[in-house]
Image (tube, rainbow, N blue to C red):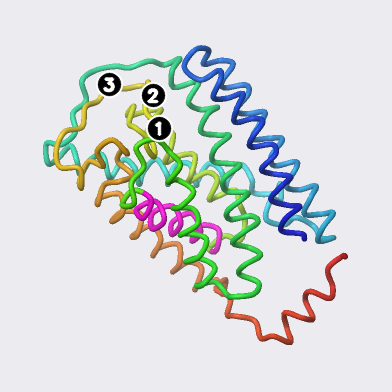
Amino acid sequence: MRVVWQLVAVAAVALIGGQGVAAAHGSNPWLTLVIGLVTAVLALLAYGWVVRRTERRTVTELAREGAAAGLGVGTLIGIAVFGLVVLQLATNGWYEIDGRGSATGAIGIVGYMAAAAVTEELLFRGVLFRVIEERTGTWLAMASTGLLFGAYHLANPDATLWGAFAIAIEAGGMLTAAYIATRNLWVPIGVHFGWNFAAAGIFSSVVSGNGDTQGLLETTATGPTLVTGGDFGPEGSVFSVLFCVLATLVFLWVARRRGNLKPRRQRTERIAATATLPR
């Protein structure tokens, strides 16, 4: 039941806040920024509260110490990885920068992406991955939650099976590996936000099928769908898969060095752990 309560608490904030962000997005960037940031903060508070109530422990994955650094480093990593994708596309003539875009549009995207990054990381890494890993170990939990994350994006506009599969590998791998390497949620939240903001807020790209974004630059992508991502956006590009896999391997290397990879628990260990949880 702890999983249910944790999912419900975060999802309720995500649903209500997401509706507010969607209503303001595109018409009032400053209101979008405020609603998005408030949604992110409320989701963090809801997660901390429900985990403390259901697991009776300190929520170490959201420790205040190192939060700013984790968010900052994660954001830079996300921007850098997406920047490599754009660089590869541009080098091959599939991506062009046409001029300046909209600074106010980028401001609204900050709020939009902050809400999405925080709520999705809390749900998929904070709740689902963390709890599944307790029973199955790191590898099965990473694979299963990655597939769930990809399937979750099938509901997006212009979604395809390939796009969902690419998301499962890219985000399901890179973001989960970021959590495993650090054992906190700040870095994966930062990576998630940085990637999305670079895509929409800087390069005005479609993000997981969600178009109508106006970032800092006016850009045009042309070429084969397999390399540009087509209507789904650059996340459907083979270059995104490639660079995210490389980032995943780096995070997993760090996780292994730190001893953060967990084996599958034996049945007796799972029973003992379950017995310590509140009923």
Q: Secondary structure at mark 2?
A: loop
Residue at 63% over, 55% down: 126
The image's mark for residue 210 is 1
Q: Are marks 1 and 2 in contact (CB under 8 Å)?
A: yes
The image's mark for residue 218 is 3
As drawn, 140 above or below 88: below
- What's the distance in space between the residues labelled 3 and 2, CA to CA? 10 Å
Comparing labels 3 and 2, the label whose residue is closer to the camera: 2
Comparing labels 1 and 2, the label whose residue is closer to the camera: 1
Residue at 44% over, 53% down: 150
The image's mark for residue 213 is 2
Looking at the rendered structure, the kind of residue marked 1 is Asn
Q: Secondary structure at mark 1?
A: loop
Q: Mark 3 vs mark 2: which is more N-terminal?
A: 2
x and y, in percent, of residue 157 in the image: 39, 35
Indicate the quadrant where residue 266 lies.
bottom right
Looking at the rendered structure, the kind of residue marked 3 is Glu
x and y, in percent, of residue 32 in the image: 56, 20
Q: Main secondary structure of the magenta part?
A: helix
Please tell me how crowded label 1 is: few (under 14), some (14-19), or many (20+) other residues with Cα within 10 Å.
some
Front in this rendered view, residue 29 or 229: 229
Picture quarter with the C terminus: bottom right
Q: What segment carries the magenta color?
A: 164-180
